[in-house]
Amino acid sequence: MCGIVGYVGPRQSEAILIAGLARLEYRGYDSAGIAVIDDGGHLGMRKKAGKLNALRDDLKAHALPDGTTGIGHTRWATHGGPTDANAHPHLADDDRLAVIHNGIVENYASLKGDLISKGYAFRSETDTEVAAVLLGREYRANGGDLVEAFRTTVNRLEGAFTLLAVHQDHPGLVVGARRNSPLVIGIGEGENFLASDVAAFVEHTRSALAIGQDEIVAITPSGVEVTDFAGNAVEVEPFEVTWDATAAEKGGWPSFMAKEVSEEPEAVANTLRGRIRDGAVAIPELDGLDELFRDISRIVVIAAGTAAYAGMVGKYALEQWARVPVDVDLAHEFHYRDPVIGPDTLVVSISQSGETMDTLMAVKYARERGAKTLSICNTQGATIPRESDAIVYTHAGPEVAVASTKAFVAQITALYLLALHIASVRGTLSATEIAQQVLELEALPAKIQHILDTDQSRIEQFAHWMADTRSVLFLGRHVGYPIALEGALKLKEISYIHAEGFAAGELKHGPIALIEPGQPVFVIVPSPRESALLHSKVVSNIREIHARGARVIAVAEEGDAAVLPISDEVLHIPLAGPLFGPVLGVVPLHIFAMGLATSKGLDVDQPRNLAKSVTVE
Ligand code: M6R
């Protein structure tokens, strides 16, 4: 889950690498380092435990010489704690070679044992240094061909990795390889880039190339060569980054999370754009797939974390509208339990980053078993969509804060579009029924904006009052249930407060024992107009906890009078159809979590122990 950047060109690389790392810091932020080959052909390297600022300070005190070739790394520790020694780059070949790495080299212990027995010494506890030492050895053995040495090395590694290397004998060359970890190429004018994510180079170029699995790339200022692990030339897929550098900047907001919550209306609107025509859903990416949608007998949604909660929301729409049975599986559980899937199964993966290793492995597993795969993803050129039969991109724009917010609402939007599309193909909804739901979808951005405009400050103030709370519960029913789970995840993730989400109907089967006087409980209340029965059930649940002294915070439709006497606080959401109201209900929960963490003085963008994309299993 580390961030990687490489540069070759005419400009001084240090500033480019540091700026690139700043944009990748969301991927890991427990240490950082850069290596630069200077104009005299010497390799200089600095690395430091802590956030990128620690490296910046270190570079002020120990300046690296100028150099136009370099690599940089921001780390999320796997093997070895977050120390200076374990930070990347790792050096080998008498400190003439530097290597950075994202992923896990699974056979590092046996390789390390072998190298130690041959007399090699190690300075860190990392798996990466093993790859570096191995590369140095291969380089010496083959007489100084860096690309070939790299090929021999990566063929000996098992696991998931992106590796970049520079050698002082080869100024103007950065070599990279990927297996199950992200790596993209940025094509500039007389300069080229490698990075885990286009965000690292988008301020310099929006022309990019996606590298496939098990491929090696060598960049020089004037060229890019991609080969497979066997050495055969490979065609790479060009793409244009659809957003510019400003989209990945805070732009005056106190945090990326604040900016991204403010972009929730736009994320929904952009995901809808170009996919609705005359009241019908028309998703160009799904053209030609009607037969697939007609033939499937079930759908399995796989995802992790917030994306899985979006999947749970989508299940209600897919089953209700498209009448296809849907299971939602946590990706990391899916392929370890011999699931029953086959050619009649559509496996829908959901991932903001498109790089989550658990989800990627589940997609590969599904494909191996003959299932059709469709990826809902927010990141162009990412691995999961490339491994899938079909893609529906969410157009939420870059999401930098570790806590996923705008991607969540965009994922639900994409799932709802998909459900309506399948319903149309399978004839399970009439054109009029689809048009009604399309109207609801189209109304979402304005309704989310309304919540932000009218209630954000009040919710933040309320969160501020609750800053000393030690535990918060969230209850929801039907589509409100995954919203409760999402509310709890967001709170625990960024405010480090114990939070749990429950299905409201489950309350009496155990969780009600947790209710004691003053216990804050958020309840996502269904619309009384649209779902009278569900509403009455949830109101009963509120009565049960209110009677036991819980502090009830109802997230309820405007005008819902029934909740007023039994709630301590009501967060209002605009009127919407039954599947849409709870989706609006997540907005106050995002604001609340952010407000509470901010009140506690925590870094909402980079919460402890976490990274934005989890690219290890
Ligand atoms: O990039 P992905 O959508 O695949 O990420 C999945 C989860 O790791 C992610 O949603 C995580 O749960 C978030 N940090 C939650 O805010």
Image (tube, rainbow, N blue to C red):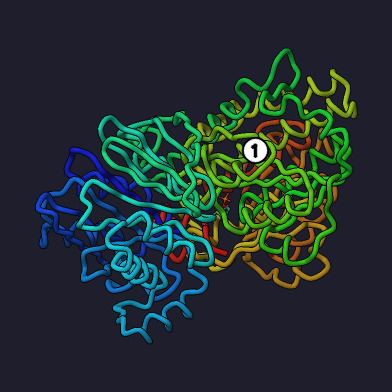
Task: Point out residue 71 in the picture as x, y percentages from the top left corner.
Answer: 28, 53
Which quadrant of the view contains residue 490?
bottom right
Q: Is residue 54 left or right of residue 615?
A: left
Q: Residue at x 48, y 58 (%)?
A: 494
Which quadrant of the view contains residue 98?
bottom left
Q: Residue at x 60, y 22 (%)?
A: 273
Q: In the rendered view, would you say 469 is above or below 208?
A: below
Residue 595 appears in the rendering? no
Under circle 1, the secondary element is helix
Q: In the displayed image of the protein, which residue is found farthest to the top?
A: 278
Q: Is residue 516 left or right of residue 471?
A: right
Task: Point out residue 259 in the picture as x, y percentages from the top left corner.
Answer: 43, 39
Task: Point out residue 59 in the picture as x, y percentages from the top left corner.
Answer: 16, 58
Q: Is residue 575 left or right of residue 120?
A: right
Which quadrant of the view contains residue 429?
top right
Q: Residue at x 58, y 48 (%)?
A: 589
346 or 270: nearer the viewer: 346
Q: Residues within 10 Å of mark 1 (few under 14, many from 20)?
A: many
- Disc 1 marks a residue whose amino acid type is Leu
Q: Which residue is mark 1?
A: 584
Task: Point out residue 567 in the picture as x, y percentages from the top left corner.
Answer: 68, 51
Q: In the rendered view, would you say 166 is above or below 9?
A: below
Q: Which of the image's four quarters has the C terminus?
A: bottom right
600 or 564: nearer the viewer: 600
